[in-house]
Amino acid sequence: MTSTPGTAPGTPPGDRSRLRRRAGTAAVAALLLAGVPAGAAVSADAGTPRTATGPQGQKLTVSATTGLAPAGQKIRVQGEGYGLTTGIYVALCKDNGDNRVPSPCLGGADMSGGSKTSQWIVPPGDPYEGDLASAFGPGGTFDVEIEVTEKGDGLDCAEVACSVVTRADHRAAGNRTQDVRIPVAFAGQEPGEPGGGEGVDVPAGTVSYTPAAEFTTAGKPLDLLLHPDSKKLYVGADNLPDTADVDERGLHVLNPEDGTSESWITQAPGSTGALRASAAARIAGPLPGDGVVYNYPLRGVGSAKSGDQAASGVWLAGSTITDIAPGTTPDTVLVAQGATLSEIERVTGTATRTLTLPGGTRFAADPERGAVWYTDFTGGKLHRVDLASFTVTGSFDLPGGPGMAGFTQTDPATGAVWVGVDRSVVVFDAAGTLVKTLVGKDLARDAAFDTETGRAYVVWQDGGDLSDPANDNNGTLTVYGSEDFAPAAKDLSLPGNHSQAGAASLAVEPGGATVFVTSPAEGKITRLARQVSPLVTHAPADLTAKEGEEVALTAEAEGTPEPTVRWQVSTDGAQTWKDVEGATEPALTFTARTAHDGYRYRAEFRNGVGTTRTAAVTLTVTPATGGDSGGDTGGDTGGDTGGDTGSTGDASNGSGSTGGDGSTGTDGGTQPSGGSTSDGSGSTGATTGDSGSTGTATGDPGSTGTTGGSTGTSGGSTPSAGGSTGTAGDSGSTVGGGVAGGTGTAATSGGGSLAATGATVMSVTLAAAGLVGTGVLVHRRARRRTEGAL
C-alpha cells in the first residue's frame, strides 16, 4: 500500500488545521538530520529490495538499493514494528557505522511537509500529524517515498558510504531505539563502497605523517632537494654554532633512507675566483643525472654533484642574491638581487636579460606557463613577469598588505602561485586571481608540491619568541589538496621547530610517501613517513543460507602499515560484539546452523594509525528442507553402501532405462548385463547414490544418484535407503529418492512423494544439480563441514 504525500497508512483525514496552528513550534524545533545515528541488521542480499531489522525488532524495507541513478531516483521505504510513542525521520544519510551519528543527510529534517528527500512519521494523534508529518499505520507501519541523489546538501555518496535510515525525530534526539539503516549504492558503485568502512578512532583512510628518522649529519640545514634521477638528498647548509669543532658549511649529499653522508662539498669560488669555505644558501634545481645548481653567499652561483671536491661557480656583481631558480635554458639561471631579476649564464656569470621591479626579494618560476611570480612583501604586491618578453604583465595586491616574508612557490600542475605571508598562505590562480587564503597558527615558511597525488605541503614555523603568547616553540606540517584546498592529512606538530635560527624548508618524494623537513634551530632534518588508517576495499554482503551449508564472508582493507584483521559477531542485534576465536584471515568460513539465524558479522581492521570496521552484515539461516536433510543421509549412506554392492551391473543397460535415475528401478534391477538381478536391483537403488560407478547407474550416475538419494529420503526413509534390496528396484519409485537407497516400501513411505501412484515428479535436488551445472546455484552443500562461527 502506498500512502499519499504527507500521510501514512491509517492517517485520519482530519487534524490538518491543528497541525498548521503548530507550524511555528515546528520551525523552532527544526534540526538538521545531521544527527541521525546508525544501526540495524540488514537481512537480504545486496539486491533490491532489502530489509533491515532494528534493535527492537523493527523492519525497514527499501525498494531499490543498488545501481541508483546519481541524478535522482524515487525509492519506496516501508516499515513495521516501530514504536507508536516516538516519531521518526526517514532519509538518505552518510553511514558512519553502528552507534554513530550519520551526518550529513540529504534534505535535512523535513518539518515542512513538502520535502521529497526525507519524511517525518509520527504516532497517530501526534500534534504534527497532517501537513507536516505522516502518521504510523497499525502496528507501527509506514509506507512512503523519498527522492535520493548521489550528491547534495553536503552529502557525496560517491565518496562516502550512504544508507537509508530511520531515527527518532528531533523531540527524542538521544533515543537510539528507532535507528535502522540499509546501505545503498549508486550506479557504478558496489554496495557498501566506497566509504571504506566505519573508522573507530579516526575516519577510515585517514592520512597522517609520523617521524621515521632524524638526520643530524648536515650542519644547519637551510634548503633541500631530493634529486629526481639519482634519488639523493641534497642539503644546503650553514655552520651550526653548537658544534664549534667542525665547520659544517657547504653542500651535503645524504642517503635519504638513513641520513648517512655520501658527499660534502665545502668549497666554492669567491669574489677573486679562489676557492673558499662557503655555505649553500638556496638550491636552484637539479642537474641532469645528478648534482644541483645553488647559491652560496653572498653572490655566488655554483654547481656540484656527489663526489666533487669543490663546486664550480661564478661570482656576480651587484647586491646580495636573495633568490635563485632554473633559467629558460639548461645553461642559465634566474637570479633575484633584491628588486632586480636577471637571467645569467652559469659558466660566465653574464646577465643576458635584466628587469628592475618596484620592489621584491623572492620569486617562483613557472616555465610551463612562461611566467615568473615576484613577491614584494614590503609593498604588499605580487608581480607577474612574462618570461618571453621579460616584462611585467600584471601586479596584484597581497591580502592584508605588507607582511613578513615567507615563501613564493608555484604548483607545477595547476600554475597556481602560493605565497606565505606572516601566518597565512594566499593562493592565486595562474591568471592572478586570489582563490584561497589558508590561515595557520604559526609562520608560513615553505611549500612543496606532489603532482602525482595533487597534494600541497606547507611547513609552518613557530616564532620562537616565548614572550609572545602565540608562540610555543612548535611548528606544524599541513597537507592540502592542491585544487580544492581541503586538508589531505592530519596536521603534524613539529616540536622545537622555530624561526629564530632560520627558515624551515621541505622536500617531498614523488607520490608523497616520504617528506623531509628541516629545523635549522635544532640542526636536523626529519624524515616523515606517510601512514594511512585502514580503508575497506571489499566488504561482505548479507547472506542467506540453509542449515548445514558452508558459508564464507570476505573482507579486505588497505592501509599503511598493512592492517591486520579479526572477525567479530553479535548475537543481539549489534548491541554487543565479541571476537570470533581464531578468525584472523580475510575470509571467514563456517557451517551455517539454525541457531546462527540473525547473527551479525563484521571485520575489524587495525594498524598503528587507527581501527576500521566493515558495516555489519546479517546471516539468515533457513531450515533445511526434508529433501535436503534426508538426501544427504540417504544419498550418502544408501548410495555409498548400495552403490558399491551393485557395482557389477552393466552401466550401458541402466543408462537407457529410467530405473537407474529414479523412474522405474525395474530396468536397473531386471536387465543387468553381466550382473545378477539382486546386484542390479536390490543394491541398485543405491547405485544412483554417491557411488556413481555402479553397474546400474544411469547416464550421469554420480549426480543423478545423489539427487535420487536426496529426494528418496526426504520423507524420512533414511534407514531404508541404506539397506536397499531388489524390491526397491522392482517396485520402481517414480522419484529418484525411491531408487536412491530405498526399498519399495521406502519409496511409498516418502522416498518419492508420488511413488505409489506412478506419476513422475522431478526431485528438488535434481533441479538444484542442474542449477549448479549452469553456475546459477550459489551455495553448495559441503561434505566436509566445520563448526559454525559463533
Image (tube, rainbow, N blue to C red):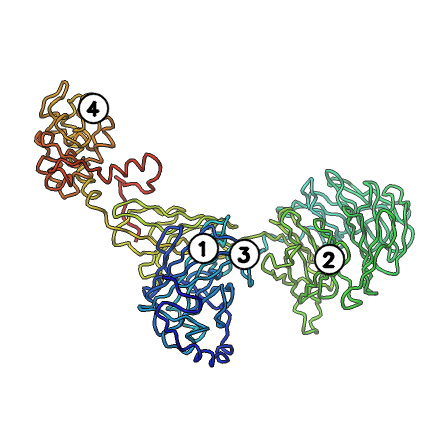
- The residue where tag 3 is placed is 206
Label at residue 159: none
- The residue where tag 4 is placed is 656
2 or 1: tag closer to the N-terminus: 1
Element type at mark 1: strand
Q: Is residue 97 above or below residue 650?
A: below
For the residue pair 702 and 73, the one nearer the viewer reads as 73
- The spot of residue 546 in percent (x, y) is 27, 47
2 or 4: tag closer to the N-terminus: 2
Label at residue 418: 2
**Outermost top residue:** 674
Left or right of 491 in this view: 340 = right
Element type at mark 3: loop
- Mark 4 against mark 3, which lies toward the viewer? 4
Q: CA gap, disc 4 to disc 3?
A: 67 Å
Element type at mark 2: strand
Q: Are marks 2 and 4 in contact (CB under 8 Å)?
A: no
Amino acid type at mark 4? Gly
Residue at the location (38% across, 46% down)? Answer: 587
Q: CA gap, disc 2 to disc 3?
A: 25 Å
Amino acid type at mark 3? Thr
Amino acid type at mark 2? Trp
Quarter of the figure with residue 255: top right
4 or 1: tag closer to the N-terminus: 1
**Outermost front residue:** 13
Q: CA gap, disc 1 to disc 3?
A: 23 Å
What is the quadrant of the C terminus in the image?
Answer: bottom left
1 or 3: tag closer to the N-terminus: 1
Element type at mark 4: helix
What is the quadrant of the N terminus in the image?
Answer: bottom left
Q: How many marks?
A: 4
Around disc 4, counting alpha carbons within 10 Å, would you say few (fewer than 14), some (14 to 19), or many (20 or more)?
some
